[in-house]
Amino acid sequence: MVDKSTNIFLERIANALERIAPPEKKIKNLDKSEGFVFDSKTGLIRPVEQINRISLSLLQGINHQKQILLNNTQDFAENLPANNALLWGARGTGKSSLVKAVHAEVLIKTKSKYLKLVEIHREDISELPELLSLLSQNKDYKFILLCDDLSFDAGENTYKSLKAALDGGIEGKPNNVIFYATSNRRHLMPRDMMDNERSTAINPSESVEEKVSLSDRFGLWVGFHNMSQDVFLEIVYAYCNEFKILVDKDVLRSEALEWSITRGARSGRVAWQFVQGLAGKHKVKIN
């Protein structure tokens, strides 16, 4: 028979263990925002007060890419089959902007309050399985999981975590989560890393195949390419029209092209930076 002092002692042990045990992780306050960021320190997601994005109509020169991602995302929101997507290609061509703009467009089209955009940073990809597990507990919501500028360098093995998460293992990927990644690399690996694998591996084809197969986990590959001068100017004109920046068109064209030459690039990002400078010069607020 256990005496009273023993019961007190056991109760103290139980209380101490309860205090040091990590709290059960649950995602709360999902109605606070349309967008969230995964916090690797807590293992939870924190709401974003206002998502940094532009409207879909302002993204010029990528109409085909817009339609592909819009259709896929709307299917996902409406409980239809949809694919994970890899948006790859030249820098500054609107890959991450497109994901954020499509999310906003689908919210409007479906009038949904339950489609959330969640960003996970590249360095936290190893924790993706845990995040997927957390998101899967919230069955009433759907999540677009975005990893911007995703790529892997020599010696990194975290791509294996991503492969497993995209395939879903025995449990399968949660039905309420879709994964969108942007990258400058089509296969997420630098070419010299793949060439090195070919030259040093015992079976080069198998070694390279393992790494290339990561991008095969994405059902959609959406390519973005360097833009022409005309498309670059279309983007500048669209921004100026949207924000009521009144400049003579010939002057605007000349200044925009000079800006792109000094930057050594023509892209949506360069166009936006030019328009920001122009808005400041003409005392026009664009935010």
Image: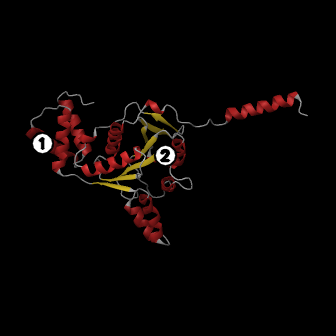
Say which amino acid is labelled 2.
Asp
Residue beneath label 2, please? 124
- Could you say which disc has been placed on residue 119 in the image? none
Q: Residue 235 appears at what percent x and percent y?
A: 20, 43
Q: What element carries label 1?
A: helix
Distance between mark 1 and mark 2 Cα atoms: 42 Å
Q: Is residue 119 left or right of residue 268?
A: right
Q: Residue 204 appears at what percent x and percent y?
A: 46, 71
Label 2 Cα neighbours within 10 Å, binned few <14 / some 14-19 / many ≥20: some
Q: In this view, does 264 lie to the left or right of 71?
A: left
Q: Residue 210 appears at what percent x and percent y?
A: 47, 64
Q: Looking at the image, is mark 1 or mark 2 earlier in the sequence?
A: 2
What residue is rendered at 54% in x and 39% in y? Answer: 43
Q: Quadrant of the N terminus?
A: top right
What residue is rendered at 35% in x and 56% in y? Answer: 221
Residue beneath label 1, please? 253
Residue occupying the far bottom of the picture: 202
Question: Which is more toward the observer, 177 or 200?
Answer: 177
Label 1 Cα neighbours within 10 Å, binned few <14 / some 14-19 / many ≥20: some
Q: Quadrant of the C terminus?
A: top left
Question: Which is more toward the observer, 192 or 104?
Answer: 104
Q: Residue 128 appears at what percent x and percent y?
A: 50, 47
Say which amino acid is labelled 1.
Arg
